[in-house]
Image (spheres, rainbow, N blue to C red):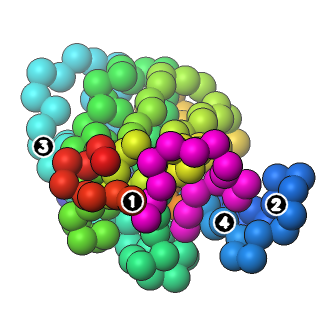
Amino acid sequence: MNPLIEIRKRALSIETVYHEGGPVAEVPLKMAAAMAVVRNPYAGRYEEDLMPFMAELRSLGRELAEELVDALGGTDRVEVYSKAAIIGINGELEHGAVWHEAGGWAMREVLGQPKAMVPANKAVACAGYRMMVPVHYIHAAYVRSHFNSMDVGLQDAPRPNEILFALVMGSGGRVHSRLGGLLKEAVQGNDGLR
């Protein structure tokens, strides 16, 4: 792998939601996060050109996206997605923003080019920081039943000179969704919104 990408550890977290206090779902919701903790090549200094790092991260993004698809049982089982970065305190927010293109591109590629934008979250933080990552429907962002989130983070990451990159996918909307709005079945899929 390129010297810009030095992975210390990877993790896969899977949640299976059977109910949220109401009836047990016929098909449980599965949410999964694939994470990689990498050395931040720009920690402690300002670097004008972050594009080489972003380009090299595409291969990692693809690996994480494929891992999530496998964990959820195939591309036809993925209905929501998102991405996140937690940057160690010797880095800057822009070091995590490289994941917008690298992680987002990878998920779209693996999932067959869905149209909805890939939501995201990022923060500069200490090791052990937990982040709520928003997700929505992969074909149309306005599908209200699929507005949800997943908690990501690792106890020992990111260290000050690291970045934790995460991709999140899930098999459906909220288990007890009942608040109306655009239904998945009514999506036209032309603009990534409706």
Tell me, yes or no, whether the highlighted magenta stretch contains residue 179: yes
The residue indicated by pointer 2 is 19
Amino acid type shown at disc 4: Leu
68 displayed left or right of 157: left
Work out whether mark 3 precedes mark 2 in sequence or the reverse, and give the earlier one.
2
The residue indicated by pointer 4 is 29
CA distance separating discs 1 and 4: 21 Å
119 displayed left or right of 19: left
Can residue 72 be seen here? The reply is yes
Amino acid type shown at disc 3: Pro
CA distance separating discs 2 and 1: 25 Å
Residue depicted at x 46% and y 69%? 78
Q: Position of residue 136 (x, y in %)?
A: 46, 48
Work out whether mark 4 precedes mark 2 in sequence or the reverse, and give the earlier one.
2
Q: Kindly report which numbered mark, 3 or 2, lies closer to the viewer in this rendering.
A: 2
Q: Position of residue 115 (x, y in %)?
A: 24, 55
The residue indicated by pointer 1 is 186
Residues shaded magenta? 171-185
Helix, strand or loop under label 1: helix
Quick check: marks 1 and 4 in contact, CB under 8 Å? no
The quarter of the picture where the N terminus appears is bottom left
Work out whether mark 1 precedes mark 4 in sequence or the reverse, and give the earlier one.
4
Can residue 164 be seen here? The reply is no
